[in-house]
Amino acid sequence: MLISSRSSRVPANEIVGMQPGELFVHRNVANVVVHTDLNSLSVLQFAIDVLGIKHVIVVGHYGCSGVHAAMERRRVGLADNWLRHVQDVHIKHAQFLPDSLPPKVRGDRLCELNVIEQVINVCQTTIVQVYSLEDGLVRDLGLAVSDFDSLAPQLEQVFNRYAELVATESK
């Protein structure tokens, strides 16, 4: 199963090297997974319990207009309520998104951090307790969670890497 941004520029099956119909896809603006979103939760539950899906992949993409709108706090209408979740990611990880970075770099980094936070959200649902990424065709952000207990140490490593990036970029 793939949870992805609503962008249709590249078919989801091509991202992971699968044929049409081999991949169950759920798309929404900025690939957000919210614990109160019955649509996303229903899709997850159906995919796992009915279709027997074994792997859930959260995929974002650089240049995501939803992520950039959230980062810039640009008003877009009703979707502002949805994009508030991405703004929360921005606030939570502000130390990795300094104003000194060029806007494109900040936007790309927020896309990555948003994917990481959505993986955490998927792992914390009552439906999914396992996450795996092994296709090598998408950028691996360092999370391949096989059980919930392995999530925290992996997150520490990922965020340490971002801290190193900020330190390097600030010089």
Image: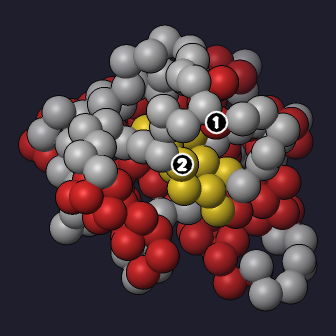
| In-front residue for pair 90/131 | 131
**Residue 127 located left or right of residue 11:** left
Left or right, residue 102 beside residue 163:
right
Which residue lies at the image location 70% right of the left edge and 62% below the top edge? Answer: 29
Nearest to the observer: residue 97 or residue 115: 115
Q: Earlier in the sequence, mark 1 or mark 2?
A: 1
Q: Are marks 1 and 2 in contact (CB under 8 Å)?
A: yes
Q: Amino acid at mark 2?
A: Val
Image quarter where the C terminus lies is top right
Circle 1 crowding by C-alpha within 10 Å: few under 14, some 14–19, many from 20: many
Which quadrant of the rendered structure holds the N terminus?
Answer: top left
124 versus 115 height, above or below: below
Quadrant assignment, res 97: top right
| Residue 40 falls left or right of residue 153 | right
Q: Which residue is mark 1?
A: 12
For the point 34% across and 55% down, which residue is it?
A: 47
What label sits on residue 25 in the rendered view?
A: 2
Task: Give x and y (percent) for residue 53.
Answer: 29, 43
Q: Secondary structure at mark 2?
A: strand
